[in-house]
Structure formats: C-alpha cells, structure tokens
Amino acid sequence: MSNFEDQFKKLGKAISANAERLAELVSYAGEEVYFDKVPGSFAELSHLDIVLGNVAEGFSASSLLMQLSHSIGRGDANRRFAPGVEEWLSTVQLKIDQYNNAIVDGSEENRLRRLHDIRELVFQMREGLLNEVRSMEMALNTRFGHVESIKDKYIENKYLIDYLGRLTGKLAVLDYQKLNSLAGSNPDLRRLLAQRLYDTVTDCRENIMLALPRLRHLLWEIEKQNKQAKRIWAMHNYFKAGSSTLTYEPSDEELIELRIGCPVTRGDNSLSPDIYNEQNVDTLAEVVSTLKPRKDITGSVVDLGKTSSFEGSAVSDESVESKDEVKQHLSNLLRETKHGHVSVLDYWEREMAHQKYPSGFMMLAHLNYTKIPQLKLTESYAPATKFDATKRLNDFTVERY
Amino acid sequence: MDIRNVLEKLYNQNMFICPYTNEPIYSFLETPEGEMKVNQALEPFGRTLCRVDGTGAFFIDAIDNGNNKDLVERRKQFEKIRDDLEPIVEFFVFISRVKPEIGMMSAGHTMRFSQILNVVTESESSIRQLNQLMTYKIFKTSKQGTLEKLQVVFERMVKEGLLISKNADELVYQVTGKYDYVQAVMQFIIDRENIVIEEENNEEQGTFVI
C-alpha cells in the first residue's frame, strides 16, 4: 500500500467519524465552536488544516473545509479559482531555481521532488483558469437564473464584469513569451509550462472570445430594461402631475414609421381576399392546401356499396360519366344529412339543375337509399286527380336515424 | 407548422407572438421559410409580418401605406394604446411598489399572483393603490373584495395581451413581448409630448475590455 493511499484511507475514516462536527463547523462559517469531547481522529483533520483550533480555544472551519462544503453543496458553482498570477509566478520561479540546483548537484531525488512541485503548481493554475471560465460560462448561460430579483441581476452583472476583468488580467500575464522564458531550455519544464499551461491559456482565451457576444447581449438587455423602467416612471410622473390626457395626434407618416401595426376589423369586407384576382390564386391554393379539414363537416359517409369507378382515360362514354356523376351526388346528399333532413328535390334544384328533369335522379336516390337501414325516407306525393288516381312522388326527404 | 394556426393567432386574434406567448410559432416565424410562408398567406389580406424593434414579438401591419382604411385602422390602434397607457403604466408601478425587490418588470419576467396578493392584503397602502388602480376604465368592476379586484386587474392585463398566465394552478403570470411594443409607443409619445425622463445613476453598468 502506497503512502498516499494509506493517508487517504486515514483521512476518509476521520471525515466519516467526524461528519456531524464538520457539518456544525461549516454551519458556523469560520466562527469558533466548542466541543466538549473530540475523538482521536479529529487530530488528523486538524493536522491537515481541514479544521483549525483546539479544545480550549474552540474549533473553526478552515477555508479548505469551506471550499469542500461549497463543492458538496453547490456542485460546480464554487470551484477553486486560479491563484493570483504574480504570486504564482514567483513561486514557480522559486521551484524552478531549486529544480535547476538539484540538477547541478546531481540529486535525482531532489530534482524529482521539485519537478513534482512545479507540476502541482501548473495543475493548480490550469484547473483554476478552466474553472473560472466554466463559472463565467455558467453565469452567462443560465442568464443569472438563480438570482431573486432584477436588482440582483444588476449586482451580478457588475460582478461578472469585474470577474471577467480579473480573469483576462491573469490570462494577459501568462503569455507564451513569459512561460517560455520561465521554462528555459529544459524539456520537462517546456512541456509543462510552454505546452500544457499555454494550451489551457489559449483555450480559455478562445472561450472568453466566444462568450463575448452573449455578454454584450446581456449588457444590452439590462440597459434596455433600465431604459424601460425610466420610461414607466417618466409617464407615471407625467400622469401624477395631472396631465392625464395625451393629446398628440400623429400624422399618417409618423404612424407608418412607428410601425404601430394594423389589426383586422371584424366584419370589414374589404379585408377579405379578392378571390377573383388572378394574382391571389396561387397563394390561396397554397393556403387552402395547408388547412386541416374542419372536423364538423367531415362526418362519416354512409357506404353506398361497391360502385364502379370511372378512370376517364380510355373510355369516353357519356353514360358512364353521367352514372359516375349521379353516384357522386348521391354521396354528397348523404353527407348533407349529417346536419338534418335533406329534401332530394331541393338538392337536385341546387346541384343538378343542369339536368332536364329530377325524376331520374330521384328514382335512383330512392332505390339506393331504401337499401340503407340507417336512413329514414319520408315521401310526399302529389294528390290524385280525376284523370289519374295513381299517387305521384313529388319529393322525399332523407334523414339519419 | 400549421399555417392556419399561425394565421388564426396573428390575423384573427391580433396576437403578438413572442417566445412567452407561443414559443413554437415564434421559432417558426424566426426562420426565413416560416416568415416567407406566413407573409405569402397574409398577402391577399393586405397584411405583412412585422416585429417589435425589428427583433422582438411578431404582429401584423398593412402592406399598402396608401390604403385609407388601413390608415384609419392604424390610427385607431395608436389611440387605443395611447388611451390605455395610464392604467398600463400604473399597473407596472403598482407591482414594483408592492414587490420592490422585483423592481420594474419587463418582457419575460414572471410574478406569482399569491405573492402579490399576500403583500396587498397585509398593507393598507397597497390596498389604497389597488383601489386607485380600479378607478381606471379598463379595470372597472363591481367586485368588492381585494382578491377579486386583484384577479380582475390581472385578467384585464391578460386580455390586453401584456401578461400571460403560465401556470393556472399556481397563478404565475409572465410579461409578454407586447410590453416592448407598448414601450416603443411610449417612447414615441414621450418624444412628441416633451415628457422628461430623469437620468439616474443608481443602476450604473460597467464596461470591460479584453
């Protein structure tokens, strides 16, 4: 078992054994808390600067514990940020000098330890920069979603601008020339500083550039809201001062320029499309083709049984066409019965007056409809005359049961 | 997208289509294809699509600027907004006073009816302000209770198309994109009537350089 593995196991046990106390310390946010008795494992936490203080003076949460608790409680919202660049550069310079000394002294163990220190510092800076960019993107993409009010948005907006200023400041210092000169000609240091760290710096710059339009839009939105609020107050003050009537009558040109809009007046016939205008035919046809059929006029049609269909391509027999037309009318008439009873004679006069007499259609209709049990036919007959005692069918109505 | 549905909203109901009133139609109208199709369908009626400030909510305007009937309609539209401006302004002032932490609302902002009601019922001054609001013609009602009065106010604002009810159970209301349209008319009136806008620096915005 490695030394680190052993240490982590001990730490895990200590955290687990003291979870309740740690939660209490976090709730006091750095203020002293007095515990009557602490288990031996508590010393492990104190040793690693997770908790500060002692039994006599009280214990308090360290910044490390607070950061841990933020990470647990708020996910990515409070990641560890990049350290101050100036201080970080000084520390890296120190470690590089020590690393170079170790090489000169020929101490391999010392060299590896210093290299590990530098690697950790680079990791810390890379993680910190990436976290800061991620936090900024999150604030932008959630559109300050977690703030409670518009005033909070103003405050967050200012914070975001300051934040971006600090971040760009850090990135500006960490340029390629600076990192290259720090690394010198050592290949290990060049790989760490001039490649890995510089790649991260480049990524961060690109991400910020990508986020800029969104940030500008946010600023524009907030500026717009600010102007809108001022307009409301200006109008309120105007009305409050007793000037409750707005009298300005704009010219037609002003209204057109204002784009006030032009709603449709109900019942204004002039607003109906001119269906006889050939220019509108294509547009109307397209509109109609996109319309869904209205449910109330698409009721079930009573099946008339198998009917011969006329394809119309090879046969030009007028009687077939006529038969087909009559069948179509029989179907149409049936459809109309959905709304109540329909007079067959009325239908003929409306739809089939181009035929000379109604008798043929009426006869066919009567023959077909009597076969359909769902239909009720009510005949009306002409009275008998002294010349003819036969009842003559004048008309009949069709309705559904 | 069903063009009939779009036309019913824009043409028949004179709706302002924004992301808050109807997100699917708004997204459709934002596409060049959607804009073209709807404009083609509106053309026989002498209407065309129009947007608040060029980027906001969609509504319809007349194509022929020389058509007298359309000019009359435009004027009526202006007069309607102008005459309703005072109650609209006072409604937003009322909300900002009842819930100062919300601030002045704008398009997209939401409010809970229950929260407004709670504050109003607990404050004499808020009840007075509500009663003052009820004196405007568009909010007139025979209702006497505070709850009913407040309901009427919100319902009328919904009817005017400035609010939309987002959640019927929790009574969450959202300010629609038509608010930006009213703001544009307001700015027009402010300019023409020489109304003074006071400049304040309490909400200053920073700048940044990268």
Image (cartoon, helix red, strand yellow):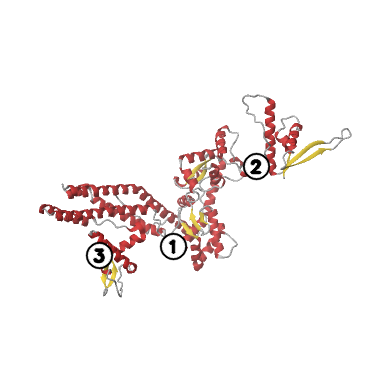
Residue A63 position by quadrant: bottom left
Distance, label 1 to label 3, CA atoms, is: 47 Å
Circles 1 and 2, Cβ within 8 Å, touching? The answer is no
Q: Position of residue A246 (x, y in %)?
A: 51, 53
Q: Earlier in the sequence, mark 3 or mark 2?
A: 3
Q: Position of residue A247 (x, y in %)?
A: 52, 52
Q: Nearer the viewer, residue A195 or B8?
A: A195
Q: Position of residue B145 (x, y in %)?
A: 57, 65
Circles 3 and 2, Cβ within 8 Å, touching? The answer is no
The residue carrying mark 1 is B100
Residue B21 visible to the viewer: yes
Q: Are marks 1 and 2 on the same chain?
A: no
Residue at (61%, 44%) from the top-left corner? A295
What is the crowding at mark 1: few (fewer than 14 residues within 10 Å), some, or many (at least 20)?
some
Residue at (28%, 54%) from the top-left corner? A127
Give the numbered dot on residue A300. 2
